[in-house]
Image (cartoon, grey):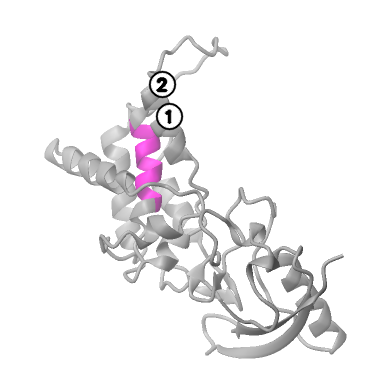
């Protein structure tokens, strides 16, 4: 059995977006085989036993597919590993005696709910602004009845792997959501089912993105570098092309 590690934690505590937050320091023992969230569970058990208020943080599947586990760890969204969500980050990525700083996403469009939990409803409103796909599907059809070139299908699937966690926003110094919006627009613009609302969709989603207060793209690539699903920067180029084309068509 692996020996436990002694970790010094500096965790951001904030009752709500209406209150000023600050870092609180804790000491916790954790197995190298624990996930980061399991370590946070151990911390909360320790805090509760001492009569304190546990740290609020978001989590759901703990399988790296939902994006709920949004934490900035030592200055990086989801922590030091490439292409990994917080729940899939293990304590063996740190060393005994390390000091680990844990913060929430930092963006005005993601107001703090409590501690490490933020409101990412802005993403939901952007998706809702894009509307629906108005295709009369009728009865179920054979899987290959609508032929899509493999290269197109691969690019659409690559964009569709975005889990909407918000790491791109947290990593960007302008808190831009263009990688997220670009992924969603790219996915639907490539598939035949997405053609009916293609122009109106991109304009509506970009307008909503701006209304939510997200910043402009910085072109530094921090979003793609920190994306746990490694969405490529090319989706932002696709977003720009789709938006420009729609505006030129008067949409």
Q: Which residue is mark 1?
A: 154
Q: Measure the alpha-carbon separation of dots 2 and 1.
A: 6 Å
> Which residue is drawn at the image coordinates 34% and 62% (left, top)?
176
Q: Which residue is mark 2?
A: 150
x then y, percent, for residue 193: 40, 24
The kind of secondary structure the magenta stretch mainly shows is helix
Judge by depth and name the residue closer to the eye, 244 or 36.
Answer: 36
Q: State the residue lying farthest toward the left.
A: 248
- The image quarter containing residue 43 is bottom right
Task: State the quadrant of the C terminus.
Answer: top left
The verdict on residue 215 being magenta is no
> Which residue is drawn at the image coordinates 82% and 82% (left, top)?
46
x then y, percent, for residue 47: 79, 84
x then y, percent, for residue 103: 55, 77
> Which residue is drawn at the image coordinates 35% and 29% (left, top)?
190
Task: State the quadrant of the N terminus.
Answer: bottom right
Task: State whether residue 12 is above or below residue 155.
Answer: below
Judge by depth and name the residue closer to the eye, 123 or 235.
Answer: 235
**Residue 22: assigned label:** none
The verdict on residue 188 being magenta is yes
> In this picture, which residue range is highlighted in magenta?
180-189
Packing grade of label 2 (10 A; few <14, some 14-19, many >=20) is: few
- The image quarter containing residue 221 is bottom left
Task: State whether residue 193 is above or below residue 68.
Answer: above
> Which residue is drawn at the image coordinates 68% and 84% (left, top)?
97
Packing grade of label 1 (10 A; few <14, some 14-19, many >=20) is: some
Question: Is disc 2 placed on a helix, strand or loop?
Answer: helix
């Amino acid at each position: 059995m692996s020996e436990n590690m002694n970790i010094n934690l500096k965790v951001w505590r904030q009752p709500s977006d209406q209150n000023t937050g600050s870092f609180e320091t804790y000491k916790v023992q954790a197995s190298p085989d624990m996930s980061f969230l399991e370590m946070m569970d151990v911390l909360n058990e320790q805090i509760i036993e001492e009569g304190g208020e546990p740290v609020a943080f978001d989590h759901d599947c703990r399988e790296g597919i939902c994006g709920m586990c949004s934490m900035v760890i030592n200055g990086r969204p989801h922590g030091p590993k490439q292409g990994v969500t917080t729940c899939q980050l293990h304590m063996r990525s740190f060393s005994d005696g390390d000091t680990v700083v844990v913060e929430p996403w930092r963006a005005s469009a993601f107001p703090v709910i409590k501690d490490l939990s933020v409101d990412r409803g802005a993403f939901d409103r952007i998706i809702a602004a894009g509307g629906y796909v108005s295709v009369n599907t009728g009865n179920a059809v054979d899987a290959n009845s609508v032929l899509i070139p493999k290269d197109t299908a691969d690019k659409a699937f690559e964009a569709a792997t975005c889990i909407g966690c918000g790491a791109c926003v947290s990593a960007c110094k302008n808190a831009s959501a263009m990688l997220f919006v670009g992924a969603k627009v790219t996915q639907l613009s490539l598939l035949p089912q997405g053609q009916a609302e293609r122009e109106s969709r991109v304009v509506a989603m970009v307008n909503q993105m701006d209304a939510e207060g997200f910043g402009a793209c910085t072109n530094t690539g921090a979003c793609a570098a920190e994306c746990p699903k490694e969405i490529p920067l090319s989706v932002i180029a696709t977003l720009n092309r789709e938006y420009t084309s729609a505006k030129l068509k008067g949409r």
